[in-house]
Image (cartoon, grey):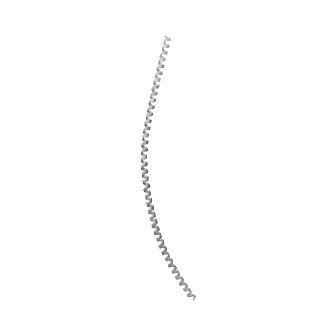
């Protein structure tokens, strides 16, 4: 009887192993199916989120490029105005510089003329005094 019981126990064990393997196989299939379903759902969500992100990024890039373009236009306008102003300022400074040079030249010329006139007067006065002294000494010698 113990052989019979052992045989029954062995068959029961084999049936339980087969049932357990079948149940594991069924659970693996169900889990695989659920995993793939979840993966597909999440994959579409991720793709949708990626598309939305790319769209927002593209919109932001377009907006920033428009702002940069406007700033460049404003900057170029200000740059050209400032360049015109500085060019005019440079022209005015050159005119003022040339006027001052001319004024200094005229003042130097006038000072030279005054020095020449003063020198001439001094020489004329010295000559006159020399002639007077010479005549005075000639009258004493005669």
Q: Is residue 24 above or below residue 121?
A: below
Q: Residue furthest bottom?
A: 1
- Who is closer to the viewer here, 15 or 7? 15
Q: Residue, x 54% and y 84% (percent of image)?
A: 12
The quarter of the picture where residue 63 lies is bottom left
Q: Is residue 12 above or below residue 29?
A: below
Q: Position of residue 128 (x, y in %)?
A: 47, 17
Q: Position of residue 117 (x, y in %)?
A: 45, 24
Q: Position of residue 115 (x, y in %)?
A: 47, 25
Q: Is residue 97 above or below residue 24?
A: above
Q: Is residue 8 left or right of residue 59?
A: right
Q: Position of residue 76 (x, y in %)?
A: 42, 48
- Who is closer to the viewer here, 31 or 18? 31
Q: Is residue 14 above or below residue 50?
A: below
Q: How many marks?
A: 0
Q: Residue, x 48% and y 72% (percent of image)?
A: 34
Q: Residue, x 51% and y 80% (percent of image)?
A: 19
- Who is closer to the viewer here, 120 or 90? 90
Q: Residue furthest top?
A: 142
């Amino acid at each position: 009887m113990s052989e019979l019981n052992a045989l029954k126990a062995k068959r029961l064990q084999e049936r339980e192993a087969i049932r357990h393997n079948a149940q594991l196989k069924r659970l693996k299939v169900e889990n695989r199916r659920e995993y793939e379903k979840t993966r597909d759902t999440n994959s579409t969500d991720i793709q949708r989120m990626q598309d939305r992100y790319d769209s927002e990024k593209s919109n932001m890039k377009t907006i920033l490029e428009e702002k940069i373009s406007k700033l460049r236009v404003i900057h170029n306008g200000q740059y050209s105005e400032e360049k015109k102003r500085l060019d005019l300022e440079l022209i005015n400074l050159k005119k003022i510089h040339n006027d001052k040079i001319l004024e200094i030249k005229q003042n130097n010329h006038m000072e030279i003329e005054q020095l020449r006139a003063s020198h001439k007067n001094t020489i004329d006065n010295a000559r006159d005094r020399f002639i007077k002294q010479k005549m005075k000494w000639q009258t004493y010698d005669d």
